[in-house]
Image (cartoon, rainbow, N blue to C red):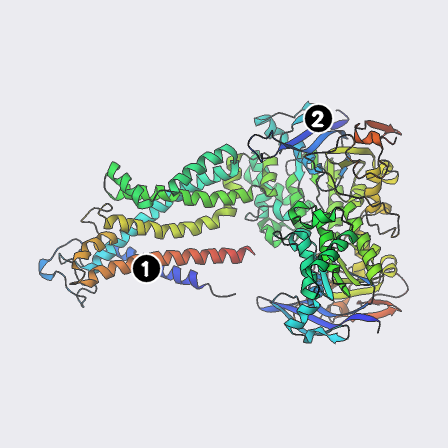
Amino acid sequence: MNNLLSIENLNIKFKSKKTYTKVVTDVSFDIKKGEILGLVGESGCGKTITSLSIPGLLPKDAIVENGKIIFDGHNIMDFNEKELTEIRGNRISFIFQEPSTSLNPLMPVGNQILENIVIHKKISKEEAKKSVISLMKKVGLSDTENMYKKYPHELSGGQKQRIVIAAAVSCNPALIIADEPTTALDVTIQAGILELLKELNAEYGSSILFISHDLALVNQMCDRIIVMYAGFIIEFSEAENIISSPLHPYTNGLIKSIPTESKKGKKLYSVEGRVSHLRENEKKCPFASRCTIAQDICFKSVPELRELIPGHFVRCFLAKGDKNG
Amino acid sequence: MDKYILEIKDLKKYYKLPRKKIFESPKFLKAVNGVSFKVERGETFGLVGESGCGKSTVGQTIVRLHNSTEGNIIFNGRDITNISGKPLKELRKDLQIIFQDPYSSLNPKKKIGWILEEPLKVHKISGSSERKSRVLSMLEKAGFDKSFASRYPGELSGGQRQRIAILVSLMLNPELIIADEPVSALDVSVQSQILNLMKDLQKDMNLTYIFISHDLNVIYYMSDKIAVMYLGEIVEYGDSESVYKNPKHPYTVSLFSAIPDLDNKDKKRIILSGDIPDPVNPPQGCPFYTRCPYVMDKCKTVKPESKNFEKNHTVKCHLY
Amino acid sequence: MKKNFNLIFGLSVIIFLFVFMFISLFHTPYSPTEMNIRERMQPPSAEHIFGTDQFGRDILSRVMEGSQTAFFVGFVAVSIGLIFGTFLGAVSGYFGGITDEIIMRIMDAMLAFPVILFALMFVSVFGVGIKNTIIAIGIMSVPSFARITRSGYIQHKQFDYVKSAKAMGAGPLRIMFLHILPNVISPIIVAASMGFSTAVLSEAGLSYLGLGVLPPSPSWGRMLNESQIYISKAPWFAIIPGIFITLTVLGFNFFGDGLREYADNTEK
């Protein structure tokens, strides 16, 4: 079996005032063993909710309508809290955006890595501590003996994120979910963290679900990219295909709106309007109201995600296989 | 009129830190440590650097939200470093600032119309009905319907809010606008709207921009000149083409290489070791020597001087 | 959205008391000060719903008249505290530094002083009477308003809209009261509602001690005081004003809590 994780037909909604808002609709994808899969989209597209649903960490008011999350051959949706706790931090671990809030401010950083090991593995404290030190070296921290005893506020943002990563890989997880892991960091620090994630991926063979709003960043990190919009997967393919020949008008617009060297002096493309989520039972393309090529059909039914070109999926009635969306 | 609208000479801004012990001599956070540059009328001057490099402090000091510790700010040929009272209030008309976070820069309890009219009221410009019609014409300029005047900021999206914030800064017909990370808090698809609007308005109203950002692609897209800041100093400055395509300072080189680039996925990256030093105790000599891959003995003790390359490209580095 | 029980309950009680007070301005069943020795200490009956006191005065009428005193004291004392407290808190929070130090240390000193003790001193220096009672209670409520206002200003002065107002040339007073105040007003209003009940309670306490409202004008606290020697013979005499004091305090406290809940919900 090649797939580590398969999500099938995931639907999540939130209750809002009178009606329900669908934040994740009909989301299905696989993560292969050892791959770095990119999940890209703007704020409110449902990427974080999707990722939180994997180890059962959804907020209480989220309602999962249906869908399966098959991890290593088991449907995690059926797991009880105790079974989920065993998986979290051990088989599936998280790296969040903000390193300063994902660490406990009152616990020395070394202990926070230790904590994760002690919970999941039955080894002595001494042994665990040794492995913490070696982990800290592995994630590129120096002066580890000293740093072990330091508190989060004594560390820089980049160092903190390295600690978070060390904790995340401490139990050798099969899947690491990295939700905007470098967004709070500076570019020169970001480059180091990305390099580290790639190294760890190569060395331990952990799969990484890499979530970001930054298409260029995801392109740099990942083999395959999923583009989400308003809770839908609207495009899915190899990174190269997405960047160089996007099929969906939204992806295409997004790429055209990013300032790059070649666009200097020209007007930037911009996607007008704002994201609106579909209400329950609303039938139309989620992007229709902002789409420049939308036609009648787009306002009447929800397009399916279809494989337009082998290996390149798109959720659009009008996309054509022969040229850019 | 003078070619240069603004000239900054050796600007320093130190913040006094609270003492930890009673008899300790006070420590200073050197946010801006000797910055000089000139801005030409009508151009966009890009100021790029990472968090904590002092770029925002430079911007806020120019519009006199802070007083500088040392140095001179010369605006339209007049030294405005220490003016206060009425002349300062008059100056505010010509010198405006746009902030990063449109969720905090618009007063949540006031309607858009009120927010836009306020600058005119503060300076007692024209009568009430004239002010109101000016507000409406400005709204139209940025592509808003008139009805927006009676909405609250909470009803607007981030991009719309930032467009309003830009309009607020333009109400008094300023000459120079400091844009402090104006698109960093926005989604990519919205960013481009703001950048386009700023460019259009610049042409329309003869504006000069100082555009501050950490995002090099945005800076390059917007600017005619680029200055790269590191630890309170400008380490490299020049025409944007020259700096972007041919960076000289090792910091600029690594900064540029670290930026994910859509056009070029597998470009070679130079990864810097270590973190930005503490601005309370900046290193002696070159501020960058602690992370520089080409560090020499000289760098640790002697502060590098500005060196000229070509006609308009200066670098502070001992390598050259 | 869940029904805001606190707000609804508090508001109903306040409206009830207000109507009660409003009617008393024009009509009371009997004259609240007219004595009738033959009818002294009557238990509640159809004629006198709440009974009569030791001089045969109708307790319902006196409670009604007393509600005027309570509302008047509460309203004026809270206004004094609100106006001065908000101003001092705004100045303190906005300017910070040495101004803040001086103002807040004075406020701390005042907070350390028991309200009743201060009122006792104040009244003994300036004379007994409703005016001085109100001033004393008002002064003592200044610090709590100042503290609440100050913390709002400290938070809001960092926001960019304040910097933006500064950069456009708006002066400090304009920024403080036109720009920031609307954003920090809701906790102040909550505090005002709570302050109202404190003021009513303080007035009752002072009047009970004989230092507040002078006889013969009725006050709930004074009624309590007068009733205590008859407590075994005429318990209603003590219970009725007690109930009204409790109702007022509860009403305004619930209303204050409800307002806070309401503000929290709408700000998200």
Please tell me the numbered disc located at residue B104.
none
Chain letter of mark 2 equals: B
Q: Is residue B48 left or right of residue A309?
A: left
Query: Residue B55, relative to residue A108: is it above or below?
Result: above
Which kind of residue does numbered mark 2 sit on? Asn
- Residue plotted at (18% across, 68% down): C46
Q: Which residue is mark 2?
A: B76
Mark identifier at residue C247 = 1
Give the foreground label among 2 and 1.
1
In the image, A253 versus A21, the foreground residue is A21
What secondary structure is marked by label 2? loop
Tell me if residue A254 comes above or below residue B218 in the rendering: below
Which residue shows up at 61% across the image and 54% down it? Answer: B155
Residue B33: image location, x then y, percent: 71, 30
- Quadrant of the image for the C terminus of chain A? bottom right
Quarter location, residue B209: top right
Chain where mark 1 sits: C
Q: Is residue C252 left or right of residue A90?
A: left
Label 2 and label 1 in one chain? no
